[in-house]
Amino acid sequence: MGRKWQFLDLGNLIELYDFDRCTGTISNALNIEPTKSQVRTL
């Protein structure tokens, strides 16, 4: 049974992975870099 794992950095890069909790394997990296119109500041 798998789940998703994500990593976010301060440069607005999002990395999404498949995570197999039985084996501890992380695979199928998907890097998402939002465009300027998608980035919101507080």
Image (spheres, rainbow, N blue to C red):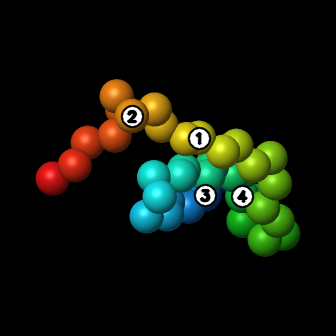
Q: Which one is closest to the eye, mark 3 or mark 1? A: 1
| Residue 35 percent across, percent down from the top left | 46, 32
Of the two numbered discs 4 and 2 on the same chain, state the one appearing first in sequence. 4
In this figure, which residue is indicated by the disc labeled 4? 19
Which residue bears the numbered disc 1? 32
- Report if residue 4 is visible in the image: no
> Which numbered disc covers residue 3?
none
The reply, left or right, for residue 31 in relation to residue 9 is right
| Residue annotated with mark 3 | 5
**Residue 39 at x, y percent in the picture:** 34, 40
State how far apart marks 2 and 1 are (Cα). Answer: 13 Å
For the residue marked with disc 4, what is the amino acid?
Phe
Is 16 drawn above or below residue 26 in the view shown?
Answer: above
Residue 26, image x, y percentages: 78, 61
Label 1 – label 4 distance at C-alpha: 17 Å
- Determine crowd level at label 4: few under 14, some 14-19, many 20+ residues with C-alpha closer than 10 A: some
Contact between labelled residues 3 and 2, with CB atoms less than 8 Å apart: no
Residue 4 relative to residue 19: left or right = left
| Residue at the disc numbered 2 | 36
Tell me what residue is drawn at x 63 percent, y 49 percent.
16
Residue lying furthest bottom in this view? 24
Query: Please, what is the three-letter code of the amino acid marked with disc 3?
Result: Trp
Q: Secondary structure at mark 3?
A: strand
Spatial distance from mark 2 to mark 3, Cα to Cα? 24 Å
**Viewer can see residue 9:** yes
Q: Position of residue 15 (x, y in %)?
A: 62, 52
Which circle's residue, 1 or 4, is located before the other in the chain?
Answer: 4
Tag 2: amino acid: Lys
Residue type, numbered disc 1: Ile
Q: Are marks 3 and 4 in contact (CB under 8 Å)?
A: yes
* The quadrant where residue 6 appears: bottom right
